[in-house]
Image (cartoon, rainbow, N blue to C red):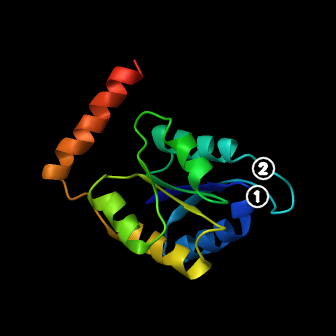
Amino acid sequence: MKVSIASDHAGYELRKLVVAHLEEKGYEVLEGGADTAALPFSYVEAGQKIAEDILSGKADRGIAICGTGIGISIVVNKYKGIRCGLCNNEFMARMSRQHNDANVLAFGARVVGSSLALSMVDAFFAEEFAGERHAERVGDICAQEDRLFK
């Protein structure tokens, strides 16, 4: 599986840790965003990279990290076909996949610690979409996107 991951400057250090974790598990990682934690980098640009990687087929799923996770999750969710879950624990990461068929996991580097972040990443990638009654809701989301993004 190919994973696009990007962050602003606030998420730089945690992104590097997550990238190493994913590569150790055998994922192909497409990395973008800040080149350092010292210089400001826009979470908007980082989020755009993730969404474009997924929508172009370069990546299957994404991970979005900024200071709180809020800004970058808003950015990626502006794209038709992206369902990003802003998560603060493993349960939310699991449910974003099982119930919402999320293709992007977002979290805040200033909100979650590194071991929790890695646990959320593992939970997100371990789960599959449950379908059934949840497929109807995801279908409703897609239909709304179709109406809004003609």
Image position of 145 with respect to 105: above or below: above
The 10 Å Cα crowd at callout 2, few under 14, some 14 to 19, many 20 or more, is many
x and y percentages locating residue 115 in the rendered image: 56, 82
x and y percentages locating residue 114 in the rendered image: 60, 78
Q: Nearer the viewer, residue 25 or 47?
A: 47
The local secondary structure at tag 1 comes to: helix
Q: Residue furthest bottom?
A: 115
What mark, if any, has residue 47 been given in the picture? none
For the point 61% across and 48% down, the residue is: 71
Give the residue number, with chain letter if any, for mark 2.
41
| Quarter of the view holding residue 45 | top right
| Quarter of the view holding residue 17 | bottom right
Image position of 79 with respect to 60: above or below: above
Q: Residue furthest top?
A: 150
Q: Classify residue 141 as left or right of residue 19.
A: left
The 10 Å Cα crowd at callout 1, few under 14, some 14 to 19, many 20 or more, is many
User: Cα distance, mark 1 to mark 2?
Assistant: 5 Å
Give the residue number, with chain letter if any, for mark 1.
9
* Residue 16 seen anywhere in this rendered image of the structure: yes
For the point 35% across and 58% down, the residue is: 96
The local secondary structure at tag 2 comes to: loop
For the point 26% across and 56% down, the residue is: 99
Image position of 32 with respect to 44: above or below: below
Of mark 1 and mark 2, the one earlier in the sequence is 1
Q: Amino acid at mark 2?
A: Phe
Query: Is mark 1 in CB contact (under 8 Å) with mark 2?
Result: yes
